[in-house]
Image (cartoon, helix red, strand yellow):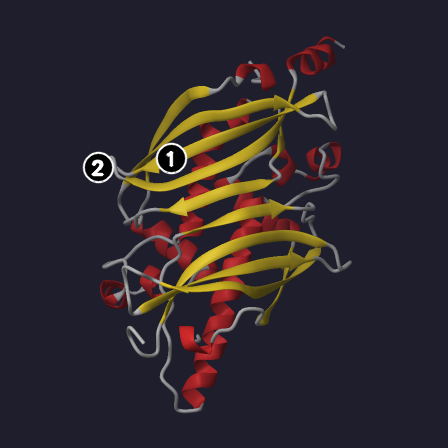
Amino acid sequence: MTLTFEDFSPGHFGTFGPRRVTREETLAFAAEFDPQPMHLDEEAAKRSMLNGLSASGWHLCSIMMRMMFDGYIGRTASLGSPGVNELRWLAPLRPGDDLTLDIEVAEARISRSRPETGIVTFKGVVRNAAGQALCEMVSPIIVRRRAVVAAEQAG
Amino acid sequence: MRFFEDIEIGQRRELGSFTFTAERIKKFATQFDPQPFHLDEEEGRKSLFGGLAASGWHVGSVCMKLLVADGERQAREAAARGEKIAIWGPSPGFRDLRWIKPVLAGDTVSFASEIESLRSSEKRPEWGILQARNTGTNQRGELVFSVLATAFVPRRTAGA
Protein backbone atom coordinates (compact mmCIF):
# COMPACT_ATOMS: atom_id res chain seq x y z
CA MET A 1 0.00 0.00 0.00
CA THR A 2 1.21 3.49 -0.85
CA LEU A 3 2.01 5.69 2.13
CA THR A 4 0.49 9.16 1.97
CA PHE A 5 0.70 12.32 4.08
CA GLU A 6 -1.82 10.94 6.60
CA ASP A 7 0.50 7.99 7.42
CA PHE A 8 3.12 10.27 8.96
CA SER A 9 2.36 11.62 12.41
CA PRO A 10 4.92 13.14 14.77
CA GLY A 11 6.94 10.59 16.76
CA HIS A 12 9.14 7.58 16.09
CA PHE A 13 8.49 6.21 12.60
CA GLY A 14 10.83 3.25 12.14
CA THR A 15 14.28 1.70 12.29
CA PHE A 16 15.84 0.47 9.06
CA GLY A 17 18.87 -1.61 8.10
CA PRO A 18 21.33 -3.01 8.83
CA ARG A 19 23.31 -2.02 5.77
CA ARG A 20 26.92 -3.23 5.41
CA VAL A 21 29.26 -0.65 3.89
CA THR A 22 32.25 -2.30 2.20
CA ARG A 23 35.74 -0.89 1.83
CA GLU A 24 35.48 -1.38 -1.93
CA GLU A 25 32.41 0.88 -2.19
CA THR A 26 33.80 3.61 0.11
CA LEU A 27 36.96 3.79 -2.02
CA ALA A 28 34.95 3.82 -5.27
CA PHE A 29 32.66 6.65 -4.10
CA ALA A 30 35.61 8.69 -2.76
CA ALA A 31 37.57 8.21 -5.99
CA GLU A 32 34.63 9.56 -8.00
CA PHE A 33 33.26 12.35 -5.78
CA ASP A 34 35.57 13.12 -2.85
CA PRO A 35 39.17 12.11 -3.56
CA GLN A 36 40.70 13.52 -0.38
CA PRO A 37 43.57 11.48 1.13
CA MET A 38 41.58 10.87 4.36
CA HIS A 39 39.05 8.86 2.29
CA LEU A 40 41.50 7.06 -0.04
CA ASP A 41 44.94 6.63 1.49
CA GLU A 42 45.36 4.50 4.63
CA GLU A 43 48.58 6.21 5.76
CA ALA A 44 47.39 9.78 5.13
CA ALA A 45 44.09 8.92 6.85
CA LYS A 46 45.94 7.79 10.00
CA ARG A 47 47.58 11.22 10.22
CA SER A 48 44.24 13.04 9.69
CA MET A 49 41.83 14.36 12.34
CA LEU A 50 39.71 11.24 11.77
CA ASN A 51 42.58 8.86 12.75
CA GLY A 52 42.03 6.33 9.99
CA LEU A 53 40.29 5.66 6.73
CA SER A 54 36.70 6.96 6.60
CA ALA A 55 33.97 7.16 3.99
CA SER A 56 33.11 10.50 2.39
CA GLY A 57 30.34 12.29 4.26
CA TRP A 58 28.46 12.59 0.96
CA HIS A 59 28.68 8.84 0.57
CA LEU A 60 27.14 8.44 4.02
CA CYS A 61 24.35 10.87 3.00
CA SER A 62 23.76 8.92 -0.21
CA ILE A 63 23.62 5.62 1.67
CA MET A 64 21.16 7.19 4.12
CA MET A 65 19.03 8.20 1.11
CA ARG A 66 19.08 4.60 -0.12
CA MET A 67 18.14 3.30 3.34
CA MET A 68 15.23 5.79 3.44
CA PHE A 69 14.18 4.64 -0.04
CA ASP A 70 14.29 0.96 0.91
CA GLY A 71 12.67 1.65 4.28
CA TYR A 72 9.69 3.80 3.27
CA ILE A 73 10.22 6.43 0.56
CA GLY A 74 10.04 3.77 -2.15
CA ARG A 75 6.40 3.11 -1.18
CA THR A 76 5.50 6.72 -0.32
CA ALA A 77 3.63 9.11 -2.64
CA SER A 78 6.65 11.43 -2.40
CA LEU A 79 7.09 14.34 -4.78
CA GLY A 80 10.69 15.02 -3.73
CA SER A 81 12.43 17.20 -1.17
CA PRO A 82 13.12 20.94 -1.20
CA GLY A 83 16.31 20.53 0.84
CA VAL A 84 17.96 19.72 4.16
CA ASN A 85 17.57 22.02 7.16
CA GLU A 86 20.61 20.64 8.94
CA LEU A 87 23.02 17.76 8.61
CA ARG A 88 25.71 16.89 11.12
CA TRP A 89 28.55 14.42 10.57
CA LEU A 90 29.24 13.30 14.14
CA ALA A 91 31.75 10.45 13.77
CA PRO A 92 33.61 8.80 10.87
CA LEU A 93 32.06 5.92 8.92
CA ARG A 94 34.70 3.18 8.83
CA PRO A 95 34.73 0.74 5.91
CA GLY A 96 33.16 -2.60 6.87
CA ASP A 97 30.71 -1.18 9.41
CA ASP A 98 26.98 -1.97 9.55
CA LEU A 99 24.56 0.96 9.59
CA THR A 100 21.07 1.33 11.00
CA LEU A 101 18.79 4.30 10.43
CA ASP A 102 16.30 5.67 12.97
CA ILE A 103 13.59 7.87 11.55
CA GLU A 104 11.37 10.20 13.52
CA VAL A 105 8.64 12.43 12.10
CA ALA A 106 9.47 15.86 13.54
CA GLU A 107 6.59 17.72 11.91
CA ALA A 108 3.76 17.06 9.45
CA ARG A 109 1.65 19.88 8.01
CA ILE A 110 -0.54 20.50 5.00
CA SER A 111 1.04 22.71 2.36
CA ARG A 112 -0.51 26.19 2.20
CA SER A 113 0.42 26.75 -1.43
CA ARG A 114 -0.47 23.21 -2.59
CA PRO A 115 -3.16 21.83 -0.22
CA GLU A 116 -3.32 18.50 -2.09
CA THR A 117 0.10 17.81 -0.58
CA GLY A 118 1.68 17.88 2.87
CA ILE A 119 5.17 18.60 4.11
CA VAL A 120 6.65 15.94 6.37
CA THR A 121 9.86 16.85 8.15
CA PHE A 122 11.97 13.86 9.17
CA LYS A 123 14.80 13.60 11.63
CA GLY A 124 17.11 10.74 10.69
CA VAL A 125 20.00 9.34 12.74
CA VAL A 126 22.46 6.85 11.25
CA ARG A 127 24.25 4.63 13.77
CA ASN A 128 27.05 2.12 13.34
CA ALA A 129 27.07 -1.46 14.66
CA ALA A 130 28.37 -0.20 18.04
CA GLY A 131 25.37 2.14 18.33
CA GLN A 132 27.43 5.30 17.85
CA ALA A 133 25.59 8.10 16.01
CA LEU A 134 27.52 8.94 12.81
CA CYS A 135 25.15 11.38 11.18
CA GLU A 136 21.97 13.34 11.98
CA MET A 137 19.76 14.98 9.41
CA VAL A 138 16.60 17.10 9.49
CA SER A 139 14.90 17.27 6.09
CA PRO A 140 11.38 17.76 4.72
CA ILE A 141 9.74 15.86 1.86
CA ILE A 142 6.56 16.72 -0.01
CA VAL A 143 3.96 13.93 0.17
CA ARG A 144 0.60 13.65 -1.58
CA ARG A 145 -2.55 13.41 0.54
CA ARG A 146 -4.55 10.21 0.86
CA ALA A 147 -7.80 11.45 -0.68
CA VAL A 148 -5.98 12.71 -3.78
CA VAL A 149 -4.10 9.43 -4.29
CA ALA A 150 -7.26 7.35 -3.62
CA ALA A 151 -9.34 9.38 -6.10
CA GLU A 152 -6.68 8.88 -8.75
CA GLN A 153 -6.40 5.15 -8.11
CA ALA A 154 -10.23 4.78 -8.21
CA GLY A 155 -10.41 6.77 -11.44
CA MET B 1 44.43 24.32 -0.61
CA ARG B 2 44.72 27.42 1.50
CA PHE B 3 45.56 27.97 5.15
CA PHE B 4 43.08 29.63 7.53
CA GLU B 5 45.21 32.80 7.60
CA ASP B 6 44.92 33.20 3.80
CA ILE B 7 41.12 33.08 3.76
CA GLU B 8 38.87 36.15 4.02
CA ILE B 9 35.12 36.58 4.31
CA GLY B 10 33.60 37.26 0.89
CA GLN B 11 36.32 35.42 -1.07
CA ARG B 12 34.72 33.56 -3.95
CA ARG B 13 36.07 30.67 -6.02
CA GLU B 14 34.56 29.48 -9.27
CA LEU B 15 34.82 25.71 -9.04
CA GLY B 16 34.05 24.68 -12.62
CA SER B 17 31.08 22.95 -14.17
CA PHE B 18 29.61 19.47 -14.64
CA THR B 19 27.12 18.12 -17.17
CA PHE B 20 24.46 15.83 -15.73
CA THR B 21 23.91 13.41 -18.60
CA ALA B 22 20.99 10.97 -18.48
CA GLU B 23 23.51 8.16 -18.11
CA ARG B 24 25.21 9.73 -15.06
CA ILE B 25 21.84 10.63 -13.46
CA LYS B 26 20.57 7.05 -13.80
CA LYS B 27 23.82 5.47 -12.63
CA PHE B 28 23.83 7.49 -9.39
CA ALA B 29 20.09 7.03 -8.84
CA THR B 30 20.23 3.27 -9.41
CA GLN B 31 22.74 2.99 -6.60
CA PHE B 32 21.48 5.55 -4.09
CA ASP B 33 18.10 7.08 -4.93
CA PRO B 34 16.02 4.87 -7.25
CA GLN B 35 12.87 7.01 -7.25
CA PRO B 36 11.10 6.80 -10.64
CA PHE B 37 11.72 10.48 -11.55
CA HIS B 38 15.49 9.90 -11.18
CA LEU B 39 15.50 6.74 -13.34
CA ASP B 40 13.06 7.16 -16.19
CA GLU B 41 12.45 10.02 -18.66
CA GLU B 42 8.69 9.44 -18.88
CA GLU B 43 8.26 9.25 -15.07
CA GLY B 44 10.34 12.42 -14.80
CA ARG B 45 8.11 14.26 -17.27
CA LYS B 46 5.00 13.28 -15.25
CA SER B 47 6.60 14.45 -11.97
CA LEU B 48 6.89 17.94 -10.45
CA PHE B 49 10.39 18.08 -11.98
CA GLY B 50 9.16 18.00 -15.57
CA GLY B 51 11.92 15.70 -16.83
CA LEU B 52 14.52 13.12 -15.84
CA ALA B 53 16.00 14.81 -12.75
CA ALA B 54 19.28 14.19 -10.93
CA SER B 55 19.04 13.05 -7.31
CA GLY B 56 19.74 15.98 -4.98
CA TRP B 57 22.46 13.85 -3.38
CA HIS B 58 24.08 13.50 -6.79
CA VAL B 59 24.13 17.31 -7.14
CA GLY B 60 25.65 17.67 -3.64
CA SER B 61 28.26 14.99 -4.33
CA VAL B 62 29.27 16.67 -7.60
CA CYS B 63 29.67 19.97 -5.74
CA MET B 64 32.04 18.14 -3.35
CA LYS B 65 33.91 16.67 -6.34
CA LEU B 66 34.51 20.13 -7.81
CA LEU B 67 35.48 21.59 -4.41
CA VAL B 68 38.15 18.91 -4.03
CA ALA B 69 39.39 19.45 -7.60
CA ASP B 70 39.66 23.20 -6.92
CA GLY B 71 41.54 22.51 -3.70
CA GLU B 72 43.97 20.29 -5.59
CA ARG B 73 44.50 23.07 -8.14
CA GLN B 74 45.32 25.53 -5.37
CA ALA B 75 47.69 23.01 -3.79
CA ARG B 76 49.57 22.58 -7.09
CA GLU B 77 49.84 26.36 -7.45
CA ALA B 78 51.16 26.69 -3.88
CA ALA B 79 53.67 23.90 -4.51
CA ALA B 80 54.84 25.62 -7.72
CA ARG B 81 55.49 28.78 -5.68
CA GLY B 82 57.49 26.69 -3.20
CA GLU B 83 54.92 27.24 -0.44
CA LYS B 84 53.73 24.83 2.23
CA ILE B 85 50.54 22.99 1.23
CA ALA B 86 47.47 23.05 3.46
CA ILE B 87 45.57 19.78 3.87
CA TRP B 88 41.87 20.29 4.65
CA GLY B 89 40.27 18.80 7.68
CA PRO B 90 36.89 17.07 7.75
CA SER B 91 33.53 18.81 7.83
CA PRO B 92 31.22 18.72 10.85
CA GLY B 93 28.20 19.22 8.59
CA PHE B 94 26.07 21.73 6.72
CA ARG B 95 22.88 23.77 7.06
CA ASP B 96 20.27 25.28 4.81
CA LEU B 97 20.80 22.99 1.82
CA ARG B 98 18.28 23.89 -0.89
CA TRP B 99 17.46 22.06 -4.08
CA ILE B 100 15.99 25.18 -5.67
CA LYS B 101 15.28 23.92 -9.17
CA PRO B 102 15.52 20.47 -10.69
CA VAL B 103 18.75 19.50 -12.46
CA LEU B 104 17.51 17.77 -15.60
CA ALA B 105 19.29 15.45 -18.02
CA GLY B 106 21.65 17.50 -20.20
CA ASP B 107 21.94 20.43 -17.77
CA THR B 108 25.38 21.86 -17.12
CA VAL B 109 25.78 23.24 -13.62
CA SER B 110 28.56 25.67 -12.66
CA PHE B 111 29.51 25.62 -9.00
CA ALA B 112 31.02 28.37 -6.85
CA SER B 113 32.03 28.74 -3.21
CA GLU B 114 32.00 31.95 -1.17
CA ILE B 115 33.35 32.34 2.39
CA GLU B 116 30.64 33.47 4.85
CA SER B 117 32.29 33.19 8.24
CA LEU B 118 35.60 32.35 9.94
CA ARG B 119 36.31 31.44 13.54
CA SER B 120 38.95 29.71 15.63
CA SER B 121 38.41 26.23 16.97
CA GLU B 122 38.38 26.40 20.76
CA LYS B 123 39.09 22.70 21.19
CA ARG B 124 41.68 22.41 18.40
CA PRO B 125 44.02 25.45 18.29
CA GLU B 126 45.78 24.17 15.15
CA TRP B 127 42.51 24.46 13.21
CA GLY B 128 40.17 27.21 12.09
CA ILE B 129 36.51 26.70 11.13
CA LEU B 130 34.97 28.25 8.03
CA GLN B 131 31.46 28.44 6.68
CA ALA B 132 31.09 28.70 2.91
CA ARG B 133 27.99 29.17 0.77
CA ASN B 134 28.38 26.69 -2.08
CA THR B 135 26.07 27.20 -5.04
CA GLY B 136 25.23 25.64 -8.38
CA THR B 137 23.89 27.62 -11.37
CA ASN B 138 22.60 26.01 -14.58
CA GLN B 139 23.34 26.97 -18.19
CA ARG B 140 20.38 29.39 -18.16
CA GLY B 141 21.84 31.30 -15.20
CA GLU B 142 19.28 29.88 -12.75
CA LEU B 143 20.39 29.08 -9.20
CA VAL B 144 19.61 25.37 -8.72
CA PHE B 145 21.55 24.40 -5.58
CA SER B 146 22.76 26.15 -2.44
CA VAL B 147 24.27 24.93 0.83
CA LEU B 148 25.99 26.54 3.81
CA ALA B 149 28.86 24.15 4.52
CA THR B 150 31.25 24.07 7.48
CA ALA B 151 34.83 22.81 7.36
CA PHE B 152 38.01 22.60 9.44
CA VAL B 153 40.92 24.41 7.80
CA PRO B 154 44.51 24.14 9.07
CA ARG B 155 46.30 27.18 10.50
CA ARG B 156 49.67 28.13 9.11
CA THR B 157 50.92 28.62 12.65
CA ALA B 158 49.18 26.49 15.26
CA GLY B 159 47.49 28.62 17.92
CA ALA B 160 48.51 31.90 16.27
User: What residue does disc 2 label?
Assistant: A130
Q: Which residue is mark 1?
A: A125
Depth check, front residue: A80 or B123: B123
For marks 2 and 1, give the one nearer the viewer: 1
Q: Is residue B70 left or right of residue A93?
A: right
Cα–Cα gap, marks 2 and 1: 14 Å
Q: Position of residue B103 (x, y in %)?
A: 67, 49
Mark 2 / mark 1, whichever is N-terminal: 1
Residue B79: numbered disc: none
Counting from the top left corner in percent of width and height, residue B34 is at 54, 36
Residue in the image at 60% along x and 53% along y: B146
Query: Which chain is home to disc 2?
Result: A
Image height of B78 relative to A7, above or below? below
Indicate whether A82 appears above or below B78. Answer: above
Q: Position of residue B32 (x, y in %)?
A: 49, 41
Front one among B100 and A41: B100
Please state which amino acid type lies under the numbered disc 2.
Answer: Ala
Q: Is residue B27 at all visible to an observer of this figure?
A: no
- Could you say which quadrant of the image residue B136 lies in? bottom right
- Pointer 2 local density, CA inside 10 Å: few below 14, some 14–19, many at least 20: few
Disc 2 on helix, strand or loop?
A: loop
